[in-house]
Image (cartoon, rainbow, N blue to C red):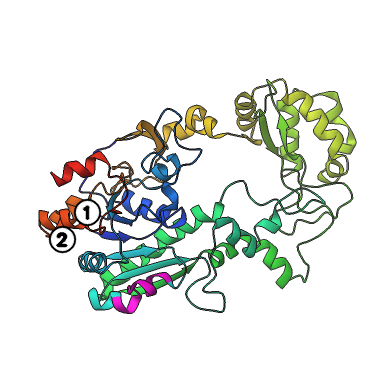
Amino acid sequence: MPEPTSLRALAGIRVVDFSWVRAGPWATRWLGAFGAEVIKIEWPENERGRLPSSTTPQHLETNLNTSGNFNETNLNKKSLSLNVRTEKGLEIVKRLIAVSDIVIENFSSRVLERWGLGYAEQCKIKPDIVYVSMSGFGHTGRHHHYTSFGPVAQSAAGLTFLSGLPEAPPAGWGWSYMDDTGGMYGAMCALTGLYHRNMTGRGQHIDQSQMIASVPLVGPALLDVTVNGRGSRRPGYPPGNRAHWPGTPFLNNYRGGPTVAPHNAYRTAPGDYNDWCVIVCCSDAEWQKLITVMGAPEWAAADKFATIAGRLEHQAEMDERIEEWSRTLGKYQLTEHCQKAGVRALPVQSAEDRVENDPQLRHREMYREIEHPALGAYKVQNAPFILSQTPAANHLPSPMIGQHNQEIVEGLLGYGRDALREGFADGTFWPQKRPRFPYMEEMLR
């Protein structure tokens, strides 16, 4: 793990992070990787992301500090456990905003207003504050008060409609895609607001809607409606890995590219659940290259497979024949043979494949080990981009809840030790009836 460096791009920037679950924390995770000091405001009774889940390592005690999902999502941050709904807690967080640059939250539109921390109030505290709200439907419009999570936003935006098998209900996506995509949008918004502030001296409220941010991801389908007057639904829709299904028109009104064949996922050796490789030939010339890679089998020379139209018409037979060959090779070996010949092919990779077996991700140091006080050493996702002059890297493990209360309350905000002790005693920093962690007792000694 690289040592923290003064060359990190956002060194000296402080972020007050009210976000929870996934989308907001994903945004602040990357601001932290760029070097910002991210202070996560959280309360043990409300932080859903810290709840026990299937991602808690089985050999560990299940508690607020051992959720694998939380600890992967909240790297590069400090934790201040604080009840903002108390008078004293509100005073402390206002004092923190006064010495910060960015405030980020992903609650529904009314939450910060109810706390007395709406944008107008933030401006009184810090006139040039950059405030990024990441609610499901934005802070304006008839649906601004609706609540949302990633899968809900995806369905409203049209992504869910574009998934599934022929003549079956929309399947949704295997992951809460818009939480992560929304988080990247959130980081982009924060950086844009920060640049504007540095250029003009003025802050602003950036009102991001998670649902609306996902709408541009279905651009080709929207164009088909607005330009061609065709709806997205058609028989056999949508194609998925296979580019075309029998009895359906040769249209591709959502992928944005031509309907071609071969275009599918093919079984590979040894034939276990995740032994697949996707192969696509976008032209007749690429098909000829694949024929060469397959060893020029006699069946592939038939006239009916010579053109894209013919291969689409006889796709089922062609796929069966290709799979007879693909089952003789491992997915990585097949990929190498195809790519060397100029054929588009890549393995279908599981999480284990990506972390342990992918040589490109290993070279790019996409998964690096970090040491966590509760979880021990484990691998986490590194930045998916490389900055030559201002490296982006995970430099802090995700915080244990309330781990940095003393550092922030005493060190940054200038409160005395008595104020820290009183805050733990009266429920400002921790629920009075909830047992404290040993490190909290240590900071109070």
Residue 368 as seen in the image, left or right of residue 215: left
Residue pointed to by mark 2? 413
Decide which of 365, 49 is in the foreground and name it.
49
Q: Secondary structure at mark 1?
A: helix
Image quadrant holding the N terminus, namely: top left
Range of magenta residues: 111-121
Please state the horizontal and vertical placement of residue 323, each as a whole percent of the image.
Answer: 77, 28
Residue type pointed to by label 1: Phe
Q: Is residue 365 visible?
A: no
Taking the image as shown, residue 391 lies to the left or right of residue 241, namely: left
**133 versus 250 height, above or below:** below
Q: Amino acid at mark 2?
A: Leu
Q: Dominant secondary structure of the magenta stretch?
A: helix
Question: Residue 378 or 436: which is nearer the viewer?
Answer: 436
Image coordinates for residue 250, horizontal then vertical, percent: 83, 54
- Residue placed at 67% from the left, 31% from the top? 276
Disc 1: CA contacts within 10 A as few (<14), some (14-19) or many (>=20): many
Question: Residue 234: percent from the left, percent from the top?
Answer: 82, 59
Question: Residue 432 versus residue 318: which sits nearer the camera?
Answer: 432
The residue at 46%/35% (across/down) is: 361
Query: Magenta segment: does it hold 83?
Result: no
User: To which residue does mark 1 refer?
Assistant: 424
Q: Are marks 1 and 2 in contact (CB under 8 Å)?
A: no
